[in-house]
Amino acid sequence: MSFRTYLIFAISLLFITQWPTVQNWLAWDRSAIFNHGEVWRLLTGNLTHTNWPHMIMNSLALAIITFIFRWHFSARQFTFLLLTLSVAVGLAIIITDIQWYAGLSGVLHGLFGWGAIKDIEGKHKGGWLLLFGLAGKISWEQIFGGSVSSAALIGARVATEAHLAGGIAGITIALLPLLYRKWKQSNPVKN
């Protein structure tokens, strides 16, 4: 499947999950997860959004990030990465005081962190700059909070906790194979 087709499918899914009846059933909701066992929300909360501008903004970001890092993955790898990041962000939100969450931004931060590490690994120009830029943005948000203009656009507080969780998860997912290869090289199997 081409990435153009993949993105059309993914953005169509984001569009469908924006409808109120679907969104109410899929958004990350602490009460529904813990009191009613609706654990799918850990994953699907990343597919829903607070409003249409939020969904459009995240859809455009997904298309741009996918375009920037497209040479690093196949559609199958990309799907695995999106699912893994979604679950990681959904689980990480549990340790925060967030009661309700909707948005793809945590996953987008994870994709960006993953891609930056892959650029560094492949010795592509700008990989370190991208990584430092991401670290700077996430650090700024942890200290000063999310963008006021973004909060006004999406009609909710920016979930900077999701950005942090996604960034850490994406970088970790990218580093794990590197660390494993280094470990295997330093611990060869003896016959």
Image: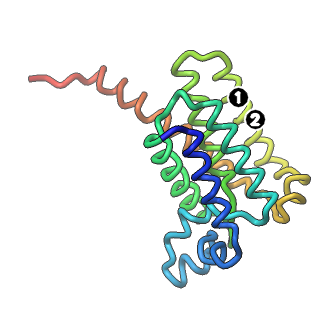
- Identity, as a three-letter code, of the amino acid under mark 2: Gly
Residue identifier under label 2: 136
* View extreme (left): residue: 191
Give coordinates of residue 56: x percent, y percent.
Answer: 76, 54
Give coordinates of residue 6: x percent, y percent.
Answer: 55, 45
Establish if 36 lies above or below 122: below
Residue identifier under label 1: 132
Give coordinates of residue 28: x percent, y percent.
Answer: 62, 69
Q: Where on the picture, by quarter, is residue 113?
A: top right
Q: Determine crowd level at label 2: few under 14, some 14-19, many 20+ residues with C-alpha closer than 10 A.
A: few
- Point out the image quarter for the C terminus: top left
* Label 1–label 2 contact, CB within 8 A: yes
Q: Which residue is pictured at 78% across the width and 58% down the height?
A: 54
Q: CA distance from mark 1 to mark 2?
A: 6 Å
Secondary structure of the residue carrying numbered label 1: helix
Q: Nearer the viewer, residue 78 or 150?
A: 78
Establish if 162 lies above or below 25: above
Q: Where on the picture, by quarter, is residue 97?
A: bottom right
Establish if 174 lies above or below 5: above
- Identity, as a three-letter code, of the amino acid under mark 1: Phe
Describe the colour scheme in one phrase.
rainbow
Left or right: residue 154 compared with residue 91? right
* View extreme (bottom): residue: 36
